[in-house]
Amino acid sequence: MTPIKHILLALLALYASASLAQTAPTVAAASDLKFALEEIAANYKVDKGQEVRLVFGSSGVLWQQVKNGAPFSLLMSADEAYIDDLYKNGLTVDKGSLYAIGRIALLQKKGGSIKLGTDKDGLIKAITEAKKIAIANPEHAPYGRAAKEYLTTIGVWDLAHPKLVFGENISQATVFALTGSADFAIAALSLAISPQVQVQSTYVLIPDHLHKPLRQKMALIKNNSSSAKDFYQYLQEPKSRQIMSRYGFTAP
């Protein structure tokens, strides 16, 4: 191949990449979705030949960014209330769709010396032995609110509170436990059972009657939604739902 052909091919590749960067929709998603959504997006690229740009964060922060005009095409929240608010304020195409019910779990790094128990006696013992306990910030992270509800419902919030360290989102809270910055975390089940996390941690599932359901909802954002409609539909197909189920989510 001549040098000029090499240059032309390189330019064509750059043009294709630039076109993709301009057209790929940005999906803003709650951090509990990280591994499940990355897998779905990879399948979407294979099945449809299209890419999406994924941005992860706490639902409350992403919600505020949408209200401030962030160019997101689709918001996948871990709390339906954020989507409902955006709809009431005319920022979404419609009321959106419930896509999953999330769960929480106690998680610690493999080799941890604390025995994790979700009942009151077991949890009191774990809290007493721990120096630091990680949860997501309940001010803007739904999984943090669920963690607080669990600790409050079981009657150990006052005992745990002085030892709490807050992650900006549930992914950061999980990292605190994995790196030893906290003795254990109240994490999203979807992260705890992911291969990437499970290889370096152990977890105990928290009974779902001990906190309000984590009803997770998504909606297309007005003025930025056209390129995300196909992915929005793809998320609701059986293949995508099976992946969500494998990561511990239940259907709404």
Image (spheres, grey):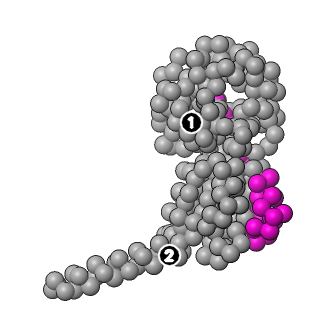
Circle 2: element type: helix
Q: Which residues are magenta?
A: 81-106
Three-letter amino acid code of the residue under disc 2: Gln
* 240 within the magenta span: no
Identify the residue under disc 1. Answer: 174
Q: Position of residue 35 (x, y in %)?
A: 54, 50
Q: Is residue 102 above or below residue 123?
A: below
Residue 98 found in image quarter = bottom right
In the rendered structure, which disc, 1 or 2, sits on the residue that comes first in sequence? 2
Residue 152 found in image quarter = top right
Side of 249 relative to 130 (left or right): right
Residue 226 found in image quarter = bottom right
Q: Position of residue 161 (x, y in %)?
A: 70, 22
Side of 11 relative to 37 (left or right): left
Q: Is residue 89 above or below residue 137?
A: below
Q: In the image shown, does 94 or 252 lie closer to the viewer? A: 94
Residue at 78% x, 32% y is 149
Cα distance between the residues tagged 1 and 2: 33 Å
Q: In the image shown, does 148 or 190 lie closer to the viewer? A: 148
Residue at 71% x, 60% y is 67
Identify the residue under disc 2. Answer: 22
Residue at 62% x, 63% y is 70
* 87 within the magenta span: yes
Circle 1: element type: helix
Quadrant for the N terminus, please: bottom left
Could one spot residue 243 in this view of the protein? no
Could one spot residue 7 in this view of the protein? yes
